[in-house]
Amino acid sequence: MKIYEKAPAKINLMLDVLHKRNDGYHEVEMIMTMVDLADRIEMAEMPRDTIMISSQAGYIPLDEKNLAFQAARLVKERYNVKKGVYIHLDKKIPVAAGLAGGSSDAAATLRGLNKLWGLGISDEELRLLGAELGSDVPFCITGGTALATGRGEKLSMMPNPPQCWVILAKPPINVSTAEVYGRVRSDRITHHPSAKRMEEAIRNQSFAGVCQELGNVLEDVTLKLHPEVGQLKEAMLRLGADGVLMSGSGPTVFGLVSKESKVPRIYNGLRGFCKEVYAVRLLT
Ligand SMILES: C[C@](O)(CO)[C@H](O)COP(=O)(O)OP(=O)(O)OC[C@H]1O[C@@H](n2ccc(N)nc2=O)[C@H](O)[C@@H]1O
Ligand SMILES: Nc1ncnc2c1ncn2[C@@H]1O[C@H](COP(=O)(O)OP(=O)(O)OP(=O)(O)O)[C@@H](O)[C@H]1O
């Protein structure tokens, strides 16, 4: 038997850091949603009791460092499954981009193995398992649009934002999420984006409101380390995007665009700056 799962990328419409916790993580408030750019994951039973990963992408680990491997190992251990699985990752989401590519692969693997092995694990239990793998994984289990609190694992679902185009541009630099959080001084944040106002804009289906309330306190840190991320934001705005923000800890910048006729100009203009540019829709 074979199972196929889609693993979409996420963007953070707002991200606020409240304070650093004793366990080293940061207490956050984020509103996340999914975009129509997804990895495709194939899971097949194997005769031997082992986990095998393959991918067409040459630049991700295929051993126990891969989050899909970790997800499969966790399910096997926790539910005492003595079967093997072959997992193929067809990567479409840029890697180490701030788009939760690895987290979404892990979430899709948890969902897929639940079906492949007929384990009957509830969504709530899948989210708890996901939290053991990473802070973004529980959201990726459910998808949709949600307010995420705690270290990102506590979710409260909300309606999807009004449909629009999302232009994603990833500059060719590597950003470490741990380093970015490590450099945040929560007591020195001067402007906190508002989850309440963003939620209101979404509930009112106000595209202008969503654009106005975009905000990510991790931007200050990443833009200081990599000024080209700031230049990319400016370029996107200049080219006509209605609202622009860095996703997660970066370095991907996304632009929201309501008019389809504006998309080619922004897309083509950005291709002059960086190779990895995508024009997609929100996953609503
Ligand atoms: C930046 C975001 O992607 C926004 O959605 C997430 O907050 C990070 O999610 P993630 O990549 O799944 O993060 P994890 O794998 O759980 O953690 C990576 C590292 O980021 C830091 N980290 C992460 C989440 C959080 N709330 N506080 C943190 O300080 C920790 O140093 C941790 O060791
Ligand atoms: N299935 C996977 N797909 C992509 N990267 C993976 C995977 N498993 C492990 N990794 C490793 O994880 C690191 C982060 O990759 P990923 O694409 O998940 O980052 P990200 O988009 O910044 O995630 P987040 O937004 O959750 O911080 C990479 O350095 C990569 O080597």
Image (cartoon, grey):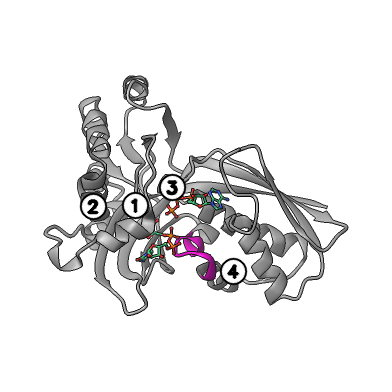
Instruction: Give yes or no for contact between labels 2 and 3 (Cβ–Cβ under 8 Å).
Output: no
Residue 133 magenta-highlighted: yes
Is residue 237 shown left or right of residue 250?
left
Is residue 207 shown left or right of residue 6?
left
Earlier residue among tags 2 and 1: 2
Expressed as whole percent of the image width and height from the top left, the position of residue 210 reads 26, 47
Expressed as whole percent of the image width and height from the top left, the position of residue 239 reads 25, 25
Find disc 1 in the rendering and name its residue: 249
Measure the C-alpha gap from mark 4 to mark 1: 25 Å
Q: Nearer the viewer, mark 1 or mark 3?
A: 1
> Which SS does the magenta portion mostly show?
helix
Q: Please rate how many residues cluster around mark 3, counting C-alpha atoms within 10 Å: few if below 14, some from 14 to 19, many from 20.
A: many
Instruction: Give yes or no for contact between labels 2 and 1 (Cβ–Cβ under 8 Å).
Output: yes
Q: Indicate if the residue with disc 1 has its beta carbon within 8 Å of ligand 1.
A: yes
Measure the C-alpha gap from mark 4 to mark 2: 32 Å
Q: Residue at x 25, y 49 (%)?
A: 219
Q: Secondary structure at mark 2?
A: helix
Instruction: Give yes or no for contact between labels 4 and 2 (Cβ–Cβ under 8 Å).
Output: no
Q: Indicate if the residue with disc 2 has its beta carbon within 8 Å of ligand 1.
A: no
Q: What amino acid type is highlighted by mark number 1?
A: Ser
Q: Is residue 168 visible?
A: no
Expressed as whole percent of the image width and height from the top left, the position of residue 128 reads 54, 73
Earlier residue among tags 4 and 2: 4
Q: Quadrant of residue 177?
A: bottom left
* Mark identifier at residue 99: 3
Q: Quadrant of ligand 1?
A: bottom left
Q: Indicate if the residue with disc 3 has its beta carbon within 8 Å of ligand 2.
A: yes
Q: Nearer the viewer, mark 4 or mark 2?
A: 2
Find disc 2 in the rendering and name its residue: 221
In the rendered structure, which segment of residues is drawn in magenta? 132-139
